[in-house]
Amino acid sequence: MNKIKPIVFFFLLTAYCLQPSAAFSQAADSAGSLKSGIAQFHEGNFSGAEVELNKAVELNPKNSSAFFYLAEVSFIMNEDKKAMENYNKTIVLDSTNAKAYKGRGRTKAKLEDFYGSIEDFTKAIKLDKKYSDAYFNRALSYLNLKDYKSAIADFSEVIKMNPKDYQAYSQRGTAKFESGDIKGACLDWSKAGELGYSKIYDTIKKNCK
């Protein structure tokens, strides 16, 4: 009986030692699938990216980056429900991911939940004060809600960070126009044109003297 104990102990010890090694291998495989998925995402191969990213989360259900890119893929592929689910999972795993809040906010705006989108864009901005995309998207939501004052303020923040952003000038011009500031609108539209947004000149001809 005494002779068996060392064998049993050795077996248990061996099995215990193998577990971390297997876990390490799984984590490495998940990281590899994530890397491949991200590369395919940036190449525009979204279906291929989705396959690799799903492998990554199967191997490591706590891989927040894989869930984030799955959400981005779903958004691009107009699968809004899946996008929301994956943004939610990303945020549960990593509540400091400003891009996830922006992505979820953008999805909510697409679904015309503008108040919900503003909440998410605001969270993204709190996490990253210089997140110009979050300011821009929040401004668009304010614009849709006809809160022109808030929209103008956010577009102005974008312009401070990116003085050559013609879209921000164009949209701020629209917000000013809707609020009754025709002169200010025309100035912003003209600046957008100067920065290369040639389509704005039709709007200028129609609304500016």
Image: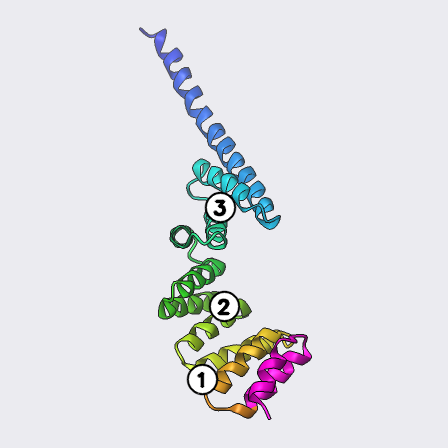
Q: x, y percentage for residue 3?
A: 36, 6
- Pointer 1 local density, CA inside 10 Å: few below 14, some 14–19, many at least 20: some
Q: x, y percentage for residue 192?
A: 63, 79
Residue at the image point whose x is 50% and y is 86% from the top: 177
How many numbered circles does the render carry? 3
List the residue tagged with mark 3.
Answer: 66
Q: x, y percentage for residue 191?
A: 64, 82
Can you say which quadrant of the picture contains the C terminus?
Answer: bottom right
**Side of 177 relative to 205 (left or right):** left
Secondary structure under the numbered disc 1 in the rendered image: helix
List the residue tagged with mark 1.
Answer: 149
* Amino acid found under the numbered disc labelled 1: Lys
Q: Which mark is residue 134?
A: 2
Nearer the viewer's eye, disc 3 or disc 1? 1
Q: Is residue 22 above or below residue 190?
A: above
Residue at the image point whose x is 47% and y is 48% from the top: 70
Can you say which quadrant of the picture contains the N terminus?
Answer: top left
Q: Is residue 188 visible?
A: no
Secondary structure under the numbered disc 3 in the rendered image: helix
Q: Earlier in the sequence, mark 1 or mark 2?
A: 2
The residue most toward the left is 1
Secondary structure under the numbered disc 2 in the rendered image: helix
Q: How much space separates mark 1 and mark 2, taking CA atoms?
A: 17 Å
Q: Are marks 3 and 1 in contact (CB under 8 Å)?
A: no
Q: Earlier in the sequence, mark 3 or mark 2?
A: 3
Q: Which residues are magenta?
A: 184-209
